[in-house]
Image: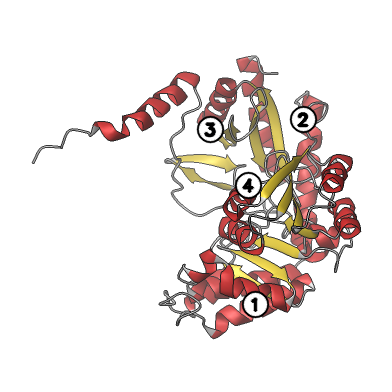
Amino acid sequence: MTNAQPRSQLAHLTKVLEELRAKGTHFNLRVLDDQQAPVCHYDGREVINLASNNYLGLANHPKLIEAARKFGVGSGAVRTIAGTMRIHMELEEKIARFKNVEACVVFQSGFAANAGTVSAILGKDDFILSDELNHASIIDGARLSRATIKVFRHKDVDHCEERLRELEKEPGHKLVITDGVFSMDGDIGPVDKLAALAEKYGAIMMVDDAHASGVLGRNGRGSVDHFGMHGKVDVQVGTLSKAIGALGGYVCGTKDLIDYLYHRARPFLFSTSHPPSVAATCIAAFDILEREPERILRLWGNTRYFQGELKRAGFNIGGQNTPATETPITPIIVGEGRAAMEFSKALFDEGVMATGIAFPTVPEGKARIRAILTSEHTRAQLDRALETIERVAKGMGIL
């Protein structure tokens, strides 16, 4: 049997791929051969892994693996038909207690949590005030809501207030939304100041804490706890896929908010619920956050050491025209997209995995390598990675 000739109807996609290759920003997926770990194997090569969001090393923690084995594989249906199991409710109740809120709903991903919530709670007569560097899931949710979107400059509280003042006499609902930690630069959103603004102007306040969950606040409770803003943020979004080590996203707030999302959030209504094994691993992860705060201390110790050594070597890890990192997310600014991708490839060939990121994920001229620290990296591993990064950068004329 011969392969059929490709149809011309999708030729425009091939053209885009050719353009990416010409720019040097096309990529192939790297395949993990074993488990997420500080040192693991991608595409058959042993590498120091500086690309994972497994901040606290929970993705392969024995207690999570043990919890997963106790339950079945599938839940059988969406939550509103026959797919709500007791363990789903236990997970939501546990997260609500952890986050100090009335209630919680779990989604299949952090992306679904953001997009499904924003599009559900607002409509075409409403307004969204969004930081210009907010995550794509927030942007997509805002578009799906059909609300009018007003973008304010990154972390510019005065500009956000200017936008709110312009809308003061408009009848629709207003939503102020920010990332708790911005995923490309690693800086922390001004949650406290934006929440005060939202209260002043009668707006809804929403925070996406995907990269703050398990990293900021007491025992990893996130940016709301970090700033002491409990009761001041109406909608808290978090993820179960990063520091928690499993899969999914969640939304926390009042009982009425969560009940409303049960009825109106489309990803919740039309997606099969989490496998019970995944829900069980998430519960185990929150237990570990409460019982082993030393993991977060190790994470921050590794972060301070690694970033300090990069600065000493002369790398630009943010500042001046680029936000400065304040978290384990560590951008090494290169500038041109092709150079960043070639730097990433050269590092991989030398045994260090750090992702190259270029436009449109980051602005033109601000392409970078993004390194992420975890609590489980040893000092010897970090030193080896630092030596490799510096040596390769000098050999390529980047440093």
Observer-nearest residue: 136 or 170? 170
Q: Residue at x 79, y 53 (%)?
A: 170
Q: Badge 3 local density, few (<14 within 10 Å), some, or many (20+)?
A: many
Query: In the visual, does 68 lie left or right of 151?
Result: left
Helix, strand or loop for disc 1: helix
Farthest-out residue, top: 397
Q: In the rendered image, which residue does mark 3 sit on?
A: 348
Q: In what element is the residue under mark 2?
A: loop
Task: Please give the residue where the numbered disc 2 appears in the rendered image.
Answer: 322
Quarter of the image holding residue 50?
top right
Between disc 3 and disc 2, the foreground one is 2
4 or 3: tag closer to the N-terminus: 4
How far is disc 4 from disc 1 in space, using C-alphas? 24 Å
310 shown above or below 200: above
Does label 2 or label 4 sit earlier along the sequence? 4
State the mark number for residue 259.
1
Q: Amino acid at mark 4?
A: Ile
Q: How is the image coloured?
A: secondary structure
Tell me which corner region of the image, top left, top right, bottom left or bottom right, holds residue 111. bottom right
Tell me the mark number nearer the camera, choosing from 2 and 4. 4
Q: Position of residue 188 (x, y in %)?
A: 80, 47
Q: Is residue 125 above or below residue 293?
A: above
